[in-house]
Image (spheres, rainbow, N blue to C red):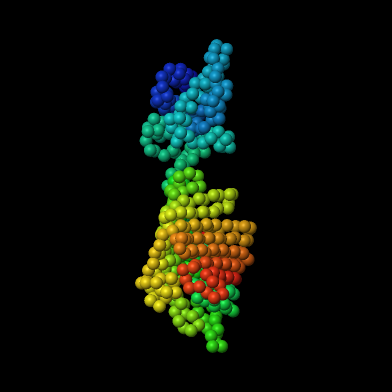
Amino acid sequence: MKTKLLSLLLISFVALSVKAQSSQEVMDYYNMKIDEIVNKWQSVSSDYDEEKTNHVYAKVLTSPVLYSSVIGHAFGDGSAREESDLLEMDDKRSDVIDGLMLNFYKEAPEHVAMTEDELRSEKSVVAYRPEISALDLKISKAKMPEDVAGGMKTTVVKPNYWKFGGRTSLTFSQSFISDNWYQGGEKNYFSMLATVDLDLNYDNQDRLSWTNHFDFDLGFATYEANNKLGFRTNTDKLRLESTFGYKVVKSLDIAAKVKAETQSLPFYGGDNNLVSAFISPLDANASIGLNYKPNIGNFKMEIYLAPFSGYNCRYVYHDELTAAYGIEKGHFKQDFGTQLVVTIPTYKLTSFLDVYSRLEYYTDYHRVFFQWEAKFNVALSKYFTASLMLHTRFDDSVARHENWKYWQFKELFTLGVAYAW
């Protein structure tokens, strides 16, 4: 008797659902009838005759599943058929139920518990028995019951557009420095170098990006004066560079770039005269231009060009150093010109060798400043590394050197420990 009652309810449900005039009406009717069917199903005794049940109704009596056959019918895979008396009754009912399921997918996709492949991987199919009505479940923010077979919890995570990374190392080295290096210095027999590179970048995966890079290098080395060995700084760099970009087309941004560079400790020459110090000099630059960022596989590059909007300034705090850094009056000078910066972020050439390169060019059409930096890191093990650093500068605003003219060169080979994240 109960089985017959259930069959009558199901047939009535199918017949009436065909008459629904819109997808919303179908959904409302579908939700109401599912509640009735489930309640009747729960009242059927456990010893019902399984052979008298019909598999056609499995789609509406089990957990909401994304069936490939329903999607196939929606795209013309066997569903574009004229109904006739020649069709089997189960086929008619299947078409109607597939239509109801398709509307369910469109109206309430968040309540689909699993795919058909996931359903097939289950050992058994458990009837979905909601404690509240299907209509209320759709409208409310109630979560899908966790005891649904194959049920999935949906967690909405706010995307994090910020990325932080860096590299730090402590190494020992041998180096060569030209006599006219702009910060001073001498070739040495032994030196120690500590470096910190930090990156804090923002990219919203749409239009806006903001990259920030901080360099800190501080090294000490032995030196010889009056037949005596001493110990003093030979490498000292503090640099902060920030670029804000707005994407106009793929790989091309309108960008604003700001850079500031100085050193942290004073340096004294062989005659104990001050050569350079903190904010002596301080070089700063601000500009607006175009930033081209081509990507070839894992290889990345940035080419920044500010044709007419580069603002450059130099500040020297100590009076006795102003003339050495091209400042004729006061402590400050500024100019406008063209800036070009080409950067290759740390790129792995092989599993154990990576390279970093940065080229900078600036001219106000009266003077020229150029510098190129390259770092080659060889990973000897997880934490031990060997590095070769090359740094070349050209600056015709400073005093001309007898041998090196306006060129300056620095080479540094190191061996030590490093850690990246």
The answer to whether one can see residue 58 in this image is no
**Residue furthest toward the front?**
366
Q: Which of the 4 image quarters holds residue 104?
A: top left
Identify the residue at image location x=54%, y=57%: 344
Task: Return the residue nearer the eye: 413 or 404.
Answer: 404
Q: Is residue 220 above or below residue 213?
A: below
Identify the residue at image location x=53%, y=28%: 71
Identify the residue at image location x=39%, y=30%: 135
The x, y position of residue 129, in whole percent, is: 45, 33
The answer to whether one can see residue 283 in this image is yes
Identify the residue at image location x=45%, y=36%: 110
Task: Return the residue nearer the eye: 34 or 116.
Answer: 116
Q: Which of the 4 image quarters holds residue 328?
A: bottom left
Q: Is residue 103 above or below residue 272?
A: above
The x, y position of residue 409, in whole percent, is: 56, 70
**Residue furthest toward the top?**
85
Count of numbered circles on the image: 0
The x, y position of residue 124, in whole percent, is: 56, 35
**Residue furthest toward the left?**
330
The x, y position of residue 75, in whole percent, is: 54, 25
Q: Is residue 236 above or below residue 22?
A: below
**Residue furthest toward the bottom?**
227
Task: Return the residue nearer the eye: 178 or 65.
Answer: 178
Q: Is residue 187 above or below residue 151?
A: below
